[in-house]
Image (cartoon, coloured by chain):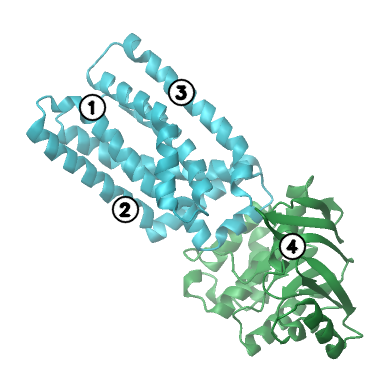
């Protein structure tokens, strides 16, 4: 479903990615962990077509990133710690705007259903600037899932959320059908990511250096690998 | 949904946002107003043929006020983190350019609705219907170039300085043509004398809209 081969991204002389190889199967959820500057966000931005790779190839849902960018965008939902919402529009106006751009059929009913599912119907006409961080994150999930994408890219979705709100986010993601989608999420908090994922991949210095199934999760082993790969980094949370 | 429906959705979104915040229009109105007033009082004291400088004053007010709007257009998207939201939409990048360009064109045209009567009144000039297409063509050229330059500078650290530095040399031919045309029409010159300027302005608009439309994809992406 997601296949990345030899992906390189360079910003001037600096390498953000140095030949990433990664596969995420259909319906699988993989957590990409790594220290700051490892290239997690860069990889997700490339897969979401927000950034062009310098070298290498990537396919999402069978579509080539370089050849079929528009078709690929229809099949991807992107959620980051930034809500990508207009503060001066209401929740409903935001969703209607994105729905029209994604050509969502039955838009009115879909918007209402999403707002209802995420517990925001009561605030549908309120401007987003009046929303709390948690409400914005819920609306952001609605935006990312509005066009019912088979692939979800979640970039640090827990950033800025306290433990309770992060737990709520997990619950919401499960309720909106996370199990039926292919998901690649990045996180600093590997323990939190484990709650949702089947596999954890460690990205360090621009490469995937280690992968481990969540079912056979061994925190000690992972910590050892992490410390070895991420020299000088602080202990894994 | 077809191309034009999505284009309208983009423009409508910008108009709705501006109607709510009024950040851009209010600053453009006030700035244009001040420019016209300051020039009017200064020239009134120093220049005998005040009407001769009116076209220049009008276009200085429009371009300077327009610059304020252009500087804000992509920055507002970026500050709210919505530039990525737009780029994630399954539409050609060129459509995003056209949407932004039309929004900028609307905001600058609204400013002109205030500036033009004020300029005519202060410089004691008579309105001519040909002024409207001239203003429109000049503003289209200015918005076409301004929108892409604004996109180019949105991630730059010194974008407030970079935007005018990059924009003015590019837009100069259109500005000269627009000033000459405005002056010619106000002086009631025969069409044959100003026709070349009109052709230059139309040519400028077509060339820069096409170039910007095609180049926007490479400008806006990382």
* Residue A46, quarter of the rendered image: bottom right
Q: In the rendered image, which residue does mark 2 sit on? A: B27
Q: Is residue B186 left or right of residue A50?
A: left
**Label 4 crowding class (10 Å Cα cut-off): few <14, some 14-19, many 20+?**
many
Frontmost residue, A105 versus A220: A220
Q: In the rendered image, which residue does mark 4 sit on? A: A43
> Chain B: what color?
cyan
Frontmost residue, A21 versus A184: A21
Q: Is residue B52 left or right of residue A20?
A: left
Marks 2 and 1 sit apart, C-alpha to C-alpha, by 26 Å
Marks 4 and 3 sit apart, C-alpha to C-alpha, by 44 Å
Query: Relative to residue A193, is residue A111 depicted above or below?
Result: above
Q: In the rendered image, which residue does mark 1 sit on? A: B127
Marks 1 and 4 sit apart, C-alpha to C-alpha, by 58 Å
Residue A69's x, y, as percent? 75, 49
Q: In the rendered image, which residue does mark 3 sit on? A: B202
- Residue sitting at x 29%, y 37%: B60
Circle 2 or circle 4, nearest the eye: 4
For marks 2 and 1, the one nearer the N-term is 2
- Residue sitting at x 72%, y 81%: A170
For marks 1 and 3, the one nearer the N-term is 1
Same chain, labels 1 and 3: yes
């Amino acid at each position: 479903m997601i296949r990345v081969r030899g992906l390189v991204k360079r910003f001037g002389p600096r390498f953000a990615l140095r030949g990433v190889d990664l596969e995420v199967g259909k319906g699988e959820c993989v957590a990409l962990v790594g220290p700051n500057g490892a290239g997690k966000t860069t990889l997700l931005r490339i897969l979401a077509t927000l950034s062009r790779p310098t070298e290498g190839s990537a396919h999402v849902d069978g579509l080539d990133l370089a050849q079929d960018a528009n078709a690929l965008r229809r099949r991807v939902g992107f959620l980051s710690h930034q809500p990508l919402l207009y503060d001066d529009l209401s929740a409903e106006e935001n969703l209607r705007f994105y729905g029209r751009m994604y050509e969502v059929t039955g838009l009115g009913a879909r918007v209402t259903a999403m707002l209802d599912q995420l517990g925001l119907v009561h605030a549908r006409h309120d401007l987003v600037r009046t929303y709390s961080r948690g409400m914005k994150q819920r609306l952001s999930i609605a935006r990312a899932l509005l066009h019912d994408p088979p692939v979800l890219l979640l970039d640090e979705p827990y950033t800025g959320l306290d433990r309770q709100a992060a737990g709520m986010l997990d619950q919401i993601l499960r309720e909106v059908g996370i199990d039926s989608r292919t998901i690649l999420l990045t996180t600093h908090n590997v323990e939190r990511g484990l709650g949702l994922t089947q596999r954890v991949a460690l990205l360090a210095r621009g490469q995937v250096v280690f992968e481990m199934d969540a079912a056979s999760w061994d925190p000690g082993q992972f910590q050892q690998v992490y410390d070895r790969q991420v020299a000088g980094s602080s202990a894994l949370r | 949904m077809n191309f034009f429906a999505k284009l309208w959705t983009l423009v409508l979104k910008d108009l709705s946002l501006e109607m709510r915040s009024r950040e851009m229009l209010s600053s453009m109105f006030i700035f244009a107003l001040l420019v016209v007033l300051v020039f009017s009082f200064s020239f009134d004291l120093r220049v005998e043929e005040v009407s001769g400088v009116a076209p220049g004053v009008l276009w200085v007010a429009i371009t300077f006020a327009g610059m304020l709007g252009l500087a804000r257009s992509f920055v507002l998207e970026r500050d709210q983190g919505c530039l990525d939201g737009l780029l994630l939409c399954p539409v050609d990048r060129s459509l995003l350019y056209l949407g932004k360009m039309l929004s900028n064109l609307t905001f600058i045209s609204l400013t002109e609705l205030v500036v033009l009567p004020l300029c005519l009144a202060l410089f004691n000039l008579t309105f001519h219907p040909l002024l409207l297409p001239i203003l429109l063509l000049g503003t289209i050229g200015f918005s076409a170039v301004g929108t892409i330059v604004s996109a180019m500078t949105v991630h730059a650290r010194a974008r407030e300085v970079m935007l005018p530095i990059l924009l003015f040399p590019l837009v100069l031919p259109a500005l000269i043509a627009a000033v000459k045309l405005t002056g010619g029409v106000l002086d009631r010159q025969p069409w044959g004398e100003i026709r070349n300027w009109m052709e230059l302005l139309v040519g400028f608009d077509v060339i820069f809209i096409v170039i910007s439309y095609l180049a926007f994809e490479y400008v806006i992406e990382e």
